[in-house]
Image: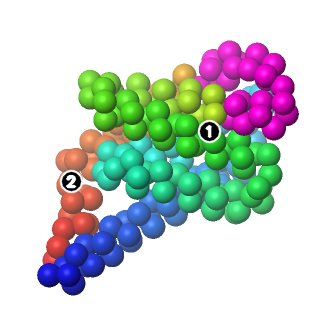
């Protein structure tokens, strides 16, 4: 019986590893492309798609592990590991994961788009909190309205992608098929 438990755990670990790889690649790809706007910090947030999918398919602990690993690996790939950008990205990603988890698990009536927008806002707040902490300058929060102006549409875009992805996952039973005992 213990062997079956290990097989299931191994399958789950393999799926998590795939999600970490996907999120890391999305994180890295976003860092390669210049922002279409001349405003620092504005990105689409594609890696948050994987975080929200992990929240839907698994649980908060797993989604947080994926989030932490993808920020480390994505920053390692882009050459920003342990730089200011890494710490801002890390805190933003963790804040987004926490907010999205709370909304997903406690407010079941919210759409994926709404949860994604809230995650984008939380990501921006986390980034600015880290910047304020490092710079010892709370005035950085005056930049928040500009960031929020862009977090809403980017959150909507990623939310629409997430919505379609979750529909596909549920319709095809893809994750349950991968994780079930053979």
Whether residue 157 is visible: no
* Above-or-below relation of 145 to 18: above
Range shown magenta: 127-151
Q: Which corner quadrant holds the N terminus?
A: bottom left
Magenta highlight: main SS: helix
Task: Return the residue at label 2.
Answer: 172
Q: Of the numbered discs in the image, which one, if any, rests on residue 92? A: 1
Q: Residue shown at 33%/75% (left/top)?
A: 10
Q: In the image, is 88 to the left or to the right of 60?
A: right
Q: Residues within 10 Å of mark 1 (few under 14, many from 20)?
A: many
Q: Residue shown at 30%/72% (left/top)?
A: 9
Q: Position of residue 24 (x, y in %)?
A: 58, 58
Quarter-of-image position of residue 81: bottom right
Q: In the image, is 74 to the left or to the right of 37?
A: left
Q: In the image, is 50 to the left or to the right of 83?
A: left
Whether residue 15 is visible: yes
Q: Residue shown at 34%/34% (left/top)?
A: 104
133 is within the stretch colored magenta:
yes
Q: Residues within 10 Å of mark 2 (few under 14, many from 20)?
A: few
Q: Residue shown at 52%/51% (left/top)?
A: 67
Q: Position of residue 82 (x, y in %)?
A: 76, 55
């Amino acid at each position: 019986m213990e062997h079956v438990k290990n097989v299931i755990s191994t399958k789950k670990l393999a799926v998590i590893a795939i999600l970490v790889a996907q999120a890391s690649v999305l994180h890295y790809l976003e860092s390669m492309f210049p922002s279409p706007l001349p405003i620092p910090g504005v990105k689409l947030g594609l890696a948050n798609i994987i975080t929200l999918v992990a929240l839907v398919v698994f649980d908060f602990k797993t989604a947080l592990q994926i989030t932490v690993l993808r920020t480390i690996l994505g920053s390692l790939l882009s050459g920003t590991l342990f730089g200011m950008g890494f710490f801002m990205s890390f805190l933003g990603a963790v804040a987004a994961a926490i907010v999205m988890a709370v909304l997903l698990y406690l407010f079941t009536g919210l759409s994926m788009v709404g949860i994604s927008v809230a995650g984008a806002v939380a990501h921006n707040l986390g980034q600015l909190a880290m910047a304020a902490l490092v710079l010892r300058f709370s005035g950085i929060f005056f930049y928040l309205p500009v960031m929020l102006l862009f977090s809403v549409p980017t959150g909507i875009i990623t939310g629409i992608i997430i919505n379609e992805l979750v529909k596909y996952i549920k319709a095809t039973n893809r994750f349950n098929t991968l994780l079930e005992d053979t």
